[in-house]
Image (spheres, helix red, strand yellow):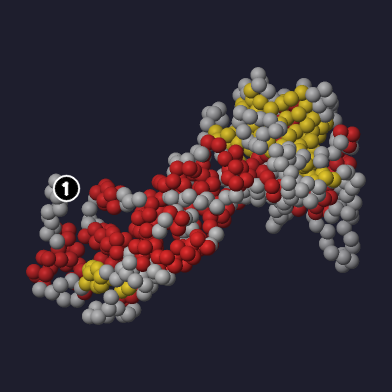
Amino acid sequence: MSFRSIVRDVRDGFGSLSRRSFDLRLSGHHRGKSRSSVHELHDQPPVIQNSRWASLPPELLRDVIKRLEASESTWPGRKHVVACAAVCKTWREMCKEIVSSPEYCGKITFPVSLKQPGHRDGPIQCFIKRDKSKLTYHLFLCLSPALLVENGKFLLAAKRTRRTTCTEYIISMDADNVSRSSSTYIGKLRSNFLGTKFIIYDTQPPYNNAQLSPPGQSRRFYSKKVSPKLPSGSYNIAQVNYELNVLGTRGPRRMHCTMYSIPTSCLEPGGSVPGQPELLPPSLEDSFRSISFSKSIGHSTEFSSSRFSDILGAGNEDVEEKERPLVLKNKPPRWHEQLQCWCLNFRGRVTVASVKNFQLIAANSQPAAPPPPAGTGPPTSQPSQSDPDKIILQFGKVGKDMFTMDYRYPLSAFQAFAICLTSFDTKLACE
Amino acid sequence: MTQLDRLSVYHWLNAWCIKPVGGALVRQEPEYILLALMGSPLKKIMLCSSEKEIFSVEEQVMVQHSVIINNMIEDGSYNHEESKIPLDCVDSKTLKKVIDYCTHHTHHHNDNQEDLEAWDAQFLNVDSNGLYDLLMAANYLEIRNLLDLIYGTIKNMIKGKKIDEIRRIFNIKDHGFTPEEEEQNRKEYPHFY
């Protein structure tokens, strides 16, 4: 048998994946073969040739993608990195290795970056454009430092619908088609009638889903055969509450956000947010493979009428101190006697006074039990986690329908956007 | 005359040689001047392609560009009288191009940047298969500046193109995604296709 016919027989017997690796082995092992062997390999029908670039040796592929990623660190150039990840499987795997999440590099790359925590070192600056006629809100990533320049990379869109008992915001990755049935739907926000309590729903389950869904709720099991057209899940990941100040309407309102999907331990040194979505979302079929999948809880239990103190202590009895949900509160503004107004330092990112403006910082966790006498046990962790200088989310008005939003670790762009949307709807005003 | 002296004379002559006139390469190759002056040829080495074709090339040219060949010469594993360096991973067509690149960049390293870049652009005006072969060869021989050049070209081939176009340019017919994954891709990035 000639060499060419041997190659052909072996090629036909292999599947496509092994074909690729077969190609690699051949190209390294033709030493000592007949002079024309290399020509023969290159003359083979496309099935071996066309996978050469897809099966580039890893160190070379790494170099190619690393250089591309380094040269395109901002949008719109960053889209070339995203395109690379969709060209073929091997390129996608390499992109996954090279592109780090916004938490570490501060750059937003893939759509899933919107659900990953923000940069640890500083805020990611975005802006929101409101369209009152269409009841839509669009979130953009700032591409230039100027405040009113509408130069941004589109991130998320939200659309408001008013119901009899509540208001709902649908959040989507598509700027034009914001609907629950679209595949770009990623979550929603629902408010109570008064606009004082809001719940944020995510289509993806948080890390502690088993603990959050109370026992007794009906669980459904989905088999792989379910059509991917069914809507994805609805998981309660956060609650935002507004309350009047002790001064009533004469003072700024108070805001508390309980982030069920983020443990307070994430703010400690070495802490992180568990249960982050995969770099690139798995196929829809994978998402239905998860065994327990609780639907959104009924209306009656949705809005707890608990006070803030209850919320801070919310959670199952056996949830450890460190796994208590992170609570964010708004930084109280100071009364400026001369200007006769409440002031917050927005560091130039907010220019129009508005009751909607806020800055969120981490609230102190529950005060720990009195520390045990020395020598009787392990030291308790210090309760103070609030760092007034670390503004985790800042939102404020800069123009008629323009608002800036700056967020950082541990919030994700999606969570930050949802929290900001609550500020549009709340009825509690301030004189 | 020692090797080092010969090299410096070579470069000095190179700088003073007649420059190309009107696109034509009217040049007095410095090695011939040296030959005339010194009466002995510049050292050549033999490179053998995977097709067993032998290419003779100046040692200095390859030593300047290829780390692999430089190491071989330095550690004395190459015997000028008898040896040839077998390059089983590089076919004749690609090896010829690589030698071309190294030779040009050695002889023309004093040219201005624009001319060199224009030459490089012309040099890399090949199809994706040829580019792949050059990439493999440059990597195998560890020719840093050629590698950088090729990476830059690949980057430009990717930038600004739709995903279907990129697959066509790089001849990627089997992208390896499951039908569901590919459908998901198209839904998430409709503008990229």
Q: Position of residue B6 (x, y in %)?
A: 18, 71
- Quarter occupied by the N terminus of chain A: bottom left
Q: Quadrant of residue A418?
A: top right
Residue extending furthest front?
Answer: A1
Residue drawn at (45%, 58%) of the image: A48
**Residue at 15% over, 53% down:** B25
From the viewer's perspective, is residue A137 above or below residue A31? Answer: above
Element type at mark 1 = loop
* Number of marks drawn: 1
Nearer to the camera, A260 or B81: B81
Query: Residue A223: x, y in percent?
Result: 76, 48
The residue that label 1 is drawn on is B23
Q: Quadrant of residue B40?
A: bottom left
Specify whether A294 is left or right of A38: right
Observer able to see residue A108: no
Output the chain of dot 1: B
Compare residues A340 and A221 and report the one nearer the observer: A221
| Residue A210 in sight | yes
User: Given the image, on which type of amino acid does mark 1 rest?
Assistant: Gly
Residue lying at the far top of the rendered structure: A133
Q: Residue at x 17, y 63 (%)?
A: B12
Tell me where residue B164 appears, x and y as whole percent: 48, 43
* Neighbours of disc 1 within 10 Å: few (<14), some (14-19), many (20+): few
> Residue B87: x percent and y percent?
34, 70
Q: Give the quadrant of the C terminus of chain A.
A: top right
State the image quarter where residue A140 is shown: top right
Q: Is residue A406 left or right of residue B48?
A: right
Locate residue A167 relative to residue A411 in the image: left or right. right
**Residue positioned 39% across, 69% down in the render:** A2
